[in-house]
Image (cartoon, helix red, strand yellow):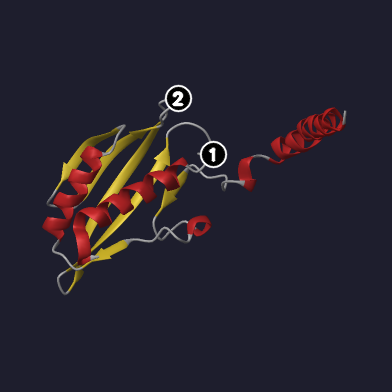
Amino acid sequence: MRRLIRLTAFLAAIALTALFVVPSLARMGTAILWPPLHRVETGRTPEYRDLQPLTVALPPARTFDAALTVARTLPRWTVVTAVPASGLIQAEARTPLWRLVHDVTIRIVPAGEGRTTVSVRSASRVGREDLGQNARNIRVFLRLLRRALGEAT
């Protein structure tokens, strides 16, 4: 009998949460979990201070090749443009479920003294909020680029 009472109390708590808490969060929007953005760029988006340009102790040509390889191997990413002379890579990243397209721009520029800086921008084509997808695009790219470049970072 006590188990039945506990189970009933537990289910009632879940029902009350569903009735009162979830709709309140929905009215507040998704800003609680993700900032209401549709474009994120390393070093330029105050809502994501952890996303900073990556500076490596490698020449731009080697960094560009590694960045291009990483962009080509990421699932659901399609490289649209790659211009080694200007250090520009443009790609399209698609979300897993709805296949929404995010435009990703990767810039590789010399930073002096044999160093190179990689900055990344990701922007949603649809909607006013990305639910954090653009930041995830940048994080996964930079993480894999660091791994590809090894100890030079």
Above or below, comparing residue 76 to residue 67 in the picture: above
- Tell me the residue at 49%/42% (across/down): 38
Amino acid on which disc 2 is placed: Trp
Q: Considering the numbered disc 1 on the image, is that residue within a helix, a strand or a loop?
A: loop
Residue 3's tag is none
Q: Is residue 86 visible?
A: no
Residue 98 in the image, given as x and y percentages of width and height: 45, 24
* Residue type at the position of mark 1: Glu
Quadrant in which residue 17 is drawn: top right
Provide the residue designation for mark 1: 129
Label 2 element class: loop
Q: Is residue 75 left or right of residue 39?
A: left
Q: Position of residue 149 (x, y in %)?
A: 20, 58
**For the view shown, which residue lies furthest in the bottom direction?**
113
Residue at the (23%, 36%) spot, across then down = 79
Q: Earlier in the sequence, mark 2 or mark 1?
A: 2
- Tell me the residue at 77%/38% (across/down): 21
- Percent across and percent down for residue 2 are 87, 32
What quarter of the picture does the N terminus occupy? top right
In the rendered image, the vertical position of residue 114 relative to residue 119, given as above or below: below
Residue 103 coordinates in the image, percent (x, y): 35, 38
In front: 41, or 56? 56
Give the residue at mark 2: 98
Q: Is residue 64 left or right of residue 105?
A: left
Q: Is residue 43 at least partly visible in the picture?
A: yes
Q: Residues within 10 Å of mark 1 (few under 14, many from 20)?
A: some
Residue depicted at 35% across the width and 47% down the height: 140
Closest to the camera, between mark 2 and mark 1, is 2
